[in-house]
Image (tube, coloured by chain):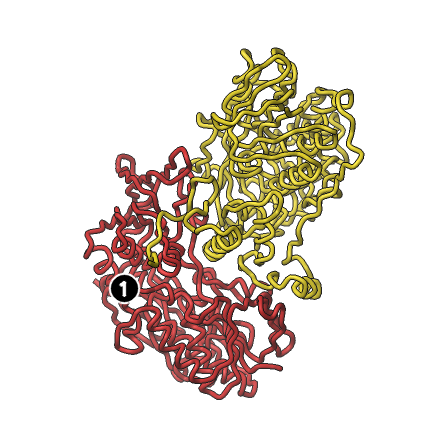
Amino acid sequence: MRRDIIVIGGGAGGLAAALSAKEDKKDVLLIEREDRLGGILNQCIHNGFGLEVFKEEYTGPEYAEIYINKFHDAHIDFLLNTTVISLEKVEDEFILYTSSLAEGIQKYTAKAVVITTGCYERTRGSIIIPGDRPKGVITAGSAQRYLNIDGYMIGKKVFILGSGDIGLIMARRMYLEGAEVLGVAELMPYSNGLTRNIVQCLNDYDIPLFLSHTVTEIKADAENRLSQITIQQVDDHFQPIPGSKKRFDVDTLLLSIGLIPDIVLLDSLPVEYDPLTKSVKINQSCETTIPGLFIAGNSLQVHDLVDNVSKESERAGHHAAEYVSRKKTDGRTIKVLPGENVSYVSPQYIDFSWGNSEIICSLRSKQKIEKAALNVIQDGKTIVRKRLMYVVPAEMETFRLDIEDLDADSDILVSLEVLS
Amino acid sequence: MYDYVIIGAGIIGTCVARELSRYSVKAIVLEKENDVANVQTLANSAIIHSGHNPEPDSLKAKLNIWGNQLYDELEQELDIPLLRSGAYVVAHNEQEEAELEKLYQNALANEVPDVALLSFEEAVKTEPNLARSITKVLTLPTTKVTYPWEVAFACMENAMKNGMEFQKNATVTKIEPKDDFYIITVNNRQTIETKAVINAAGVASDDIAAMIDKTVEFKITPRKGEYFVLDNRMKGFVNHVLYPLPSEAGKGVLLTPQVHGEILVGPNSVYVEDKYRTDVSFEGLNYVKANAGALAENVPFHKIIRSFAGIRATSTYDDFYIQESKEHKGIFHFGGLESPGLSAAPAIAKYLLRDVIHIEKLFPEKPDFDPIRKKKPEFHTFTLDEKRKLIEEYPTYGNIICKCEQITEKEIVDAIHAPLGSNTIKGLKKRTRAGAGLCQGGYCEEKVMKLIARETGVSPLTIAYDATDSALFLEETKVEE
């Protein structure tokens, strides 16, 4: 039986996308590889979720539960413990093969697909960290899962490389679980986590943050267990400064050095990649360059707040529903290009064949800017100018465009101007 | 009383074990690590060289060429993976072209099959990303790439099937000569009596030799090599092994396509003090990066998933050292089996038994020797119909544990319970590739850990990453009363 829409991934993104598609009266199937819905929220037992969507603070599992309850109330079909092993498009139809213990290999077809597969953590291999290669060097998210879901402590003397939010959250979590957390080193001169996490996870527990520092040596003991790390200050070109070495005796080094959208499933599809987001390019409807293939949440761009994952995915679900119902129309497509001080902007395209007039865009700054002006320029004309205070790479900025204001003939440039 | 004790279960020890298991001998392999193939065999370029490089008439040349041919046999008998990539050695200018010509003559002298010199234009047809600065290429069609750990597993499994014994976590601490036998002490407590000893201890071979001989004719001068691994989505970026011209320091920084699609970039070559320390360094990895550009255009360094280092057992002896001790009958040493040690390994084993030990005069061949080992199915390589059939029989093939490499529960459980099974995260990664992909185990390590706990009935607190004392966890937080 052909489904209207298949949603792949049952975390925050997938739940919201499935709900909105179902709300639009579409026949939806959600496929989740784990044994429960909720995704990574299940291991995020700290609070701070939901302020944007619900104006209230929840823990990760609580936030997930709200969506899971709605999801069940809406009677949406779903599969657990089921991995999508291939995804292809033949003419107007998507063909998915899944694998599971219960059902073996199954084939599903759909008119539209929404990818909400989240992201994975960068590991030691993806950056050069010199030194021995003992166990005890582990990504912060893996340590979080071991601690919060499985109930195992991986170590008691902890240092953290990278000030991403998971690293900061884990600094506090390990501290509260009785570990000695000796510090956090961040390569950049600013934190890569939310300000509130710096305050609530480090400052409140007197955990030092070493900005412009990186790990330059990892030492193992004779049994190849992590025993010591060395951090060093770096110069403007990120080169270690001699004489700035600090050594810490540790048994654990947590890595919080970045998240990468998990789009492995799109390998066999001719999608257009965006090296800036490390995901794929989309239009304003979260549609990839393959008609009917939608993507949202952390598999599209790594968000700082789950609330934004939910909102973006909800839109993707509605758009997928619209795609299933609408008549094909032709329209021009223009590019949205990142300009000065902008590390990326999403969507990368605006497709005038889509009816929705409001376009929600997001971007990240390349650097910390105290006072900035966001400029959206098309054909020499400023369409949007918005003043922003304290722009940092760690915090995503959003702005809106009205399609009525846009010209279908020329590309759009989005830049951040530094104001004095 | 054993007839032979083999010290070391790297590629050499396991190849010797398999050859020896053809004969009616009582023998055991002792390995100090918690697994087969855990030191040199674990971390190298995985290349079966053609034999173009060694000095003509050296043991290295002879055994490299022979070993290269024997891998075709091993592929048939042991079901090991071989990527018949061929190789190009590249030159960038007239001076290098002159060196390349010498290497070509060397390859001809070694009777390497099918070698030829190609222009850049000819070579780039089959290797589109070849660096534009290259002017001439020596093609070596018989160069192959294998999966060294699996060759070692296959040899050891097959040897065990034919009666060979194996003990891991067994460090030889003493070798004592008696009248016509030796007493080997393991881990300072267990003793083993044997008539003969084969020292295949790799980087430790000089230390083992020194336990018994007053004069050791070789000393290991360890050389470290560092590598990057590029994601297997880069498969096809290079199709051949790409070598620069060899130098004193070895074969140089290479680009090597791997059997599972990854591309290795490296190694550098640095003499080191500590033969067991496989750390990586800024200098080393930056050197590798800087030199890879001489081989191919736009090497995709943004696709690095891992870096690692390995130690070469370079020795002070000028060739492979494969000899009986001058002081003790029945003690056989391997020394300095650096590159092309992997390429030559199957030939080294035959050479030792045939030309050094003269085994055919000592022991009869077993009439029932079974040379065949079948590898367990690699599920993700099958067609949908094949997968369905297998899942009908074994439903746990349906449960995907390692998402990046699509490794299933059945494959991991099989690897835990196999005759040469493993109960560590790294051991299972080596056997199944769970955790070898893009996320490097970020997703599946926990699931593998739980499978080990379930299948072996132990607490997760005792599960090790690699060595027996490298437990993943320190303590449990939520202990139920």
Name the residue nearer the viewer: B44 or B120. B44
Measuring from the top left, give residue A320's x and y in whole percent. 50, 80
Q: What letter labels the chain drawn in red? A: A
For residue A14, above or below residue A197: below
Measuring from the top left, give residue B248's x and y in whole percent. 56, 25
Residue drawn at 65 percent across, 77 percent down: A91
Label 1 sits on a secondary structure element that is strand
| B41 on left or right of A137 | right
Q: What is chain B's hue in the picture?
A: yellow
| A89 on left or right of A55 | right
For residue B212, above or below residue B138: above
Measuring from the top left, give residue B286's x and y in whole percent. 45, 39
Residue linked to disc 1? A391
Tell me if residue A241 can be seen: yes
Q: Chain of mark 1?
A: A
Q: Amino acid at mark 1?
A: Val
Residue drawn at 62 percent across, 51 percent down: B236
| A247 on left or right of B454 | left
Residue drawn at 69 percent across, 26 percent down: B61
The N terminus of chain A lies in which quarter of the figure? bottom right
Tell me if residue B136 can be seen: no
At label 1, counting other C-alpha atoms closer than 10 Å, the crowd grade (few under 14, some 14-19, many 20 or more) is many
